[in-house]
Image (cartoon, rainbow, N blue to C red):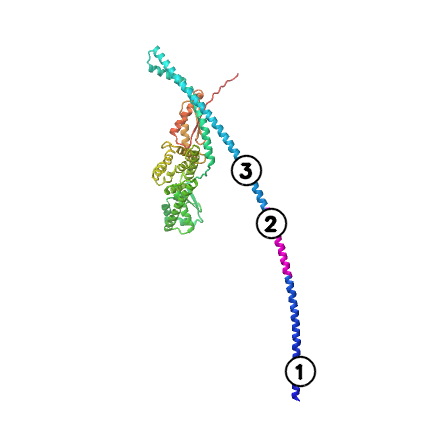
Amino acid sequence: MITWIIVSSALSALVAGGGSYLISRKLSHANLEVLLEQSKAKAKAIEYEAERILQESKIKAKELELESQQKYERETAKIIKEYENNLLDFKKERLKETQKIEREQCKLDHERQLISKDKNALLLEQESLKKLKTTYQNKIEELTQKLTTISAITKKEAKELLFEKIQEESRQEIAQILRRQEKQLKEEAKARAAYILAQATSRFAGEFAAERLIHTIMLPSDDMKARIIGKEGRNIKTLEMICGVDIIIDDTPGVIIISSHNLYRRSIAVQTIQKLIEDGRIQPARIEEIYQKCYEEFEQNIFEEGQRVILDLGLGNIHPDIIKLIGKLRYRASYGQNALSHSLEVANLAGIIAAELGGDYLLATRAGLLHDIGKARTHDFKGTHVDLGAEIARRYNEHPVVLNAILSHHGDEEAKSIEAAAVCAADALSAARPGARREVLENYLRRVSEIEKIALSKMGVLHAYAINAGREVRVIAKSEDISDDESYLLAREIAKDIEANVQYPGEVKVSVIRETRACAIAE
């Protein structure tokens, strides 16, 4: 019985467990179907969203493409319009330049015609003077014969009497003839000279640099002064000895002054001190080390400077030692005018002037660049810069025209070529332009005083005034002693005396002024 009950209970439990399993399986299957449906719905939603985003992206891409196309077309149209405007402006400017050149050519042709006409007139005048001279000689011979026949004097005495009389009576006539001839020659030369100088100065404009004899260095603090001086002045003595400059330390806060006539040494000293201040270690051994580095840098820099100048001027085949001397001219000054800047001015002006006169442009440029090369060595060797420059030119086998330009630009010998003459003219033009040079007050006053003294020493001069920085002297002559024609001769005499006795840059213009005043009183 008990066994039956147990079996029945087991069967019941088995039936119940199988039913539960079946029910659970059906429920799980139903849940899976629901989840599957939900997943399919989500997948469709995602697919729809993706298609929508894709469509929007395509639309946006088309819009961007259209906008880019429009922007490209606008920029293209703008560039084409600017190009057309620039082309039109260029054509207008070119037309203006062409018209300007044509006007200048017409003007030049007209000036040439005038010069040719004046030249022909001068030739006719010279022919008439020759005829007049022949007539005078015949008259003199005739009068001499008559005087010899009539009086008891010899032929030689008669000639002397006639010459004295003719010279006295013909002084004004000679002055008039000289004045007229020189005026014609000046007008002929002036047109050509003005054209050449205008071409040269308008085609080249150099910068002007004037060097001072001192350089001020700003210190970060007053304590640095004591460190530069050093214990018992050892540092400052070492600096002055190695650099070859004077170092001035006064009560001015935060400043020391470097003084030297040698611009090259002064520049090296300035850079040495600046590097020592940056480094902070100021002692004799360190000073020597820093100075040596700065010296080597400057030597390299001046060589590169010389190469740059030669490259800019289009010159070639120059010895490396001369290239180095050209760069060193940057640290040399004359009357406050930088020697390298002056040499560049002369080189460019001489080349242009020589080219206008039919000479060799490059040779004149080379001669102009090297005409003052001796100034790079005047601090280290004895002699004038002309002698030193000539010695350099001979040593390195420079062209004879270059040597002649070096010797002739200060009158040591005559200019033997167009190129050398162009260098002389360009040197005077560069040195004499306003602002090119500074001059010591004492020298200026002495020169002005000498010019006035020469003018006042002439007979018939009432007053003399040197004006325009000594480049012009105006002479007031006594009208009762000097005639109009004699005033012209007086001006020539004063000019010759100034040339012989006064040292001056450029030229000095002499103007003689006379007037006659008639005064009467009605009572």
Front position in the image: 314 or 387: 314
Mark 2 or mark 1: name the one nearer the start of the chain. Answer: 1
Indicate whether residue 95 is drawn in magenta.
Answer: no
Quarter of the image where one finds residue 270 = top left
Q: Do the residues labelled 2 and 3 touch (CB within 8 Å)?
A: no
Magenta stretch secondary structure, dominant: helix
Relative vertical location of residue 180 with respect to residue 470 in this rendering, above or below? above
Magenta segment boundaries in residue numbering: 48-74
In the rendered image, is residue 133 in sight? yes
The reply to whether discs 2 and 1 touch (Cβ–Cβ < 8 Å) is: no
Asked if residue 248 shows in the view, the reply is no
N-terminal of the two: label 2 or label 3? 2
Q: What residue type is labelled 1?
A: Ser
- Amino acid, disc 2: Gln
Q: Gap in Å between the C-alphas at discs 2 and 1?
A: 84 Å
Q: Where is residue 155 in the image (x, y as percent from the top left)?
A: 33, 14
Name the foreground residue: 449 vs 6. 6
Q: In this view, does 65 lie above or below 362?
A: below
Q: Mark 2 points at which residue?
A: 69
Residue at the disc numbered 3? 91
Q: Mark 1 points at which residue?
A: 12
How far across and how far down the image is residue 58, in percent?
A: 62, 55
Left or right of 62? Residue 520 is left
